[in-house]
Image (cartoon, rainbow, N blue to C red):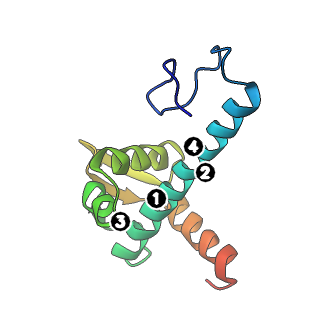
Amino acid sequence: MATDASNAAGLPDPFDRSVSRLQAVAAYLRWMASEKVSRDKVIEAIYDAVDGTSIGFVNVIDVGTALGLSSDEAKQAADGLVQRGFLAHMTQGRAAQLTTEGVRYVEELRHDRTGER
């Protein structure tokens, strides 16, 4: 769906008249959903690596690449988690630590998925 006038995420330029608003919105929603899936995979893997605590540090690039993400995708997912207050202590885009909010988010995510904590 990317046109000559698209942004870095490959989304259509909202001012490109060859793309309908509905197409642009649909592309944006697909992109947002894929970003959330990546963030959720990364935070769950970090949670598992630190045994569900906010004590240990992990290398988010290593976690992301183990999940099949590129290092840029892993860093982008981690940056989104930092912005949401779920990760702290990002150093050069690598070492990160779950916050108590991050631990709570994963527990709620898993509870919503399985009905268990």
> Which residue corresponds to the image point at 64% horizontal and 70% vertical from the top-left?
108
Question: Which tag, 3 or 1, sits closer to the chain's start?
Answer: 3
- The CA span between labels 2 and 3 is 17 Å
Q: Which residue is disc 3 drawn over?
A: 67
- The CA span between labels 4 and 1 is 26 Å
Q: Which residue is disc 2 drawn over?
A: 33
- Proximity of marks 2 and 4: CB atoms separated by less than 8 Å: yes
| In this view, 17 is above or below 12 | above
Q: Position of residue 11 (x, y in %)?
A: 55, 31
- Proximity of marks 3 and 4: CB atoms separated by less than 8 Å: no
- The CA span between labels 3 and 1 is 21 Å
> Which residue type does callout 4 highlight?
Trp
From the viewer's perspective, is the residue at label 3 or at label 1 nearer?
3
Label 3: state its secondary structure.
loop
> Which residue corresponds to the image point at 69% horizontal and 74% vertical from the top-left?
112
Answer whether residue 55 is visible to the viewer in this image.
yes
Q: Which residue is disc 1 drawn over?
A: 99
Q: Position of residue 28 (x, y in %)?
A: 63, 37
In this rendered view, identify the residue nearer to me: 16 or 82: 16
Q: Residues within 10 Å of mark 1 (few under 14, many from 20)?
A: some
> Which residue corresponds to the image point at 53% horizontal and 58% vertical from the top-left?
37
Question: Which tag, 2 or 3, sits closer to the chain's start?
Answer: 2
Q: Which residue is disc 4 drawn over?
A: 31
> Which residue type does callout 3 highlight?
Leu
In this rendered view, identify the residue nearer to me: 104 or 37: 37
> Which residue type does callout 1 highlight?
Thr
Question: Which tag, 2 or 1, sits closer to the chain's start?
Answer: 2
Label 2: state its secondary structure.
helix
